[in-house]
């Protein structure tokens, strides 16, 4: 069975705002004979839920939601949901952590002052004679619209390539890096139909740059930076949290609906 994905809207976004997101975790409560209580958190993973309210949907957009609901048989089957409020990467400030893949001659130094006043930036140095890359894979469809953003600076003027790639396609955008921190971004969709898409940086031979705050979002432009550790905004075991899709149609044949989704970490 092919992977199911919650669909993007025609404008390249995952939702219309406002989006409601909530977390819940089960607890066990033991009431003792003296009336006191012992409360223990359940070891099972917490759950996260979203309420997505849509209006003005086209027939094609409404049809995509209906198709996913039908294919997943309502609450029964799971699908991949890309959280519209979150960073889709993991370890956004630590390229030495699991999830990142660095070419052999790319050197990483941590603990560098960052543009937000902390020490979460890193130095990337290409010690080789050929371009070197730092990449991370996201479990989303390659044909979605994505925005990859990152803060960069360098001691001297240089260029860095922002890479988006899949099994069959690749896109790059070369950006100028100055001596002061600047957030750069590259957005777009790849033409193929691959499961999985990679994002990252490519440094020319001998280049050294300071890097902070890598972020990927399933939308056309960058939002506020969200620092991430070991969990990302990609939920591969999401479900509809409703038994039916209720829709309203206006005189312009535009559709409105509310979608309930739940997933576990």
Image (cartoon, rainbow, N blue to C red):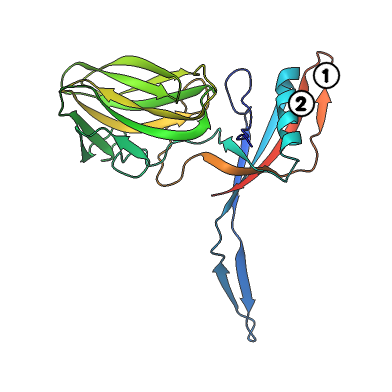
Which image quarter: residue 94? Answer: top left
Question: What element does badge 1 sit on?
Answer: loop
Mark 2 Cα shell of 10 Å, populated few (<14), some (14-19), many (≥20): some
Please name whichever residue, 34 or 163, is drawn nearer the observer in this view of the structure. 163
- Residue at 53% across / 24% down in the picture? 219
Q: CA distance from mark 1 to mark 2?
A: 8 Å
Q: Which mark is residue 216?
A: none
Disc nearer the start of the sequence (1/2): 1
Q: Can you identify the residue that label 2 sits on?
A: 256
Q: Can you identify the residue that label 1 sits on?
A: 250
Relative to 195, is 124 on the left or the right?
left
The answer to whether mark 1 and mark 2 are in CB contact below 8 A is yes
Residue 124 in the image: state x and y as whole percent. Answer: 22, 31
Relative to 64, is 251 on the left or the right?
right
User: Can the viewer see residue 152 in this picture?
Assistant: yes
Which image quarter: residue 30? Answer: bottom right
- Residue at 82% across / 26% down in the picture? 248
User: Can the viewer see residue 224 in this picture?
Assistant: no
Total numbered circles: 2
- Residue at 62% across / 72% down in the picture? 29
């Amino acid at each position: 069975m092919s992977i199911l994905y919650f669909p993007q809207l025609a404008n390249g976004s995952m939702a219309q705002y406002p989006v409601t997101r909530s977390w819940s975790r089960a607890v066990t409560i033991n009431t003792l004979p003296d009336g006191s209580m012992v409360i223990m958190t359940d070891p099972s993973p917490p759950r996260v839920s979203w309420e997505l309210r849509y209006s003005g949907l086209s027939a094609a957009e409404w049809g995509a939601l209906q198709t996913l609901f039908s294919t997943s048989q309502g609450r029964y089957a799971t699908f991949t949901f890309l959280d519209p409020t979150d960073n889709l990467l993991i370890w956004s400030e630590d390229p030495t952590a699991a999830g990142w893949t660095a070419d052999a001659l790319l050197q990483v130094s941590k603990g560098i002052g960052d543009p937000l006043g902390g020490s979460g930036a890193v130095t990337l140095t290409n010690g080789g004679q050929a371009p070197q890359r730092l990449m991370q894979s996201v479990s989303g469809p390659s044909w979605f619209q994505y925005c990859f953003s990152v803060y960069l600076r360098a001691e001297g003027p240089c260029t860095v390539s922002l890479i988006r790639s899949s099994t069959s396609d690749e896109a790059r955008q070369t950006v100028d890096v100055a001596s002061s921190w600047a957030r750069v971004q590259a957005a777009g969709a790849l033409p193929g139909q691959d499961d999985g898409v990679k994002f990252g940086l490519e440094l020319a031979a001998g280049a050294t740059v300071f890097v902070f705050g890598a972020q990927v979002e399933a939308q056309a432009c960058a939002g506020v930076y969200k620092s991430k550790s070991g969990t990302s905004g990609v939920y591969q075991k999401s479900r509809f949290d409703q038994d039916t899709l209720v829709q309203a149609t206006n005189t312009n044949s535009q559709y409105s609906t509310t979608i309930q989704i739940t997933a576990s970490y």
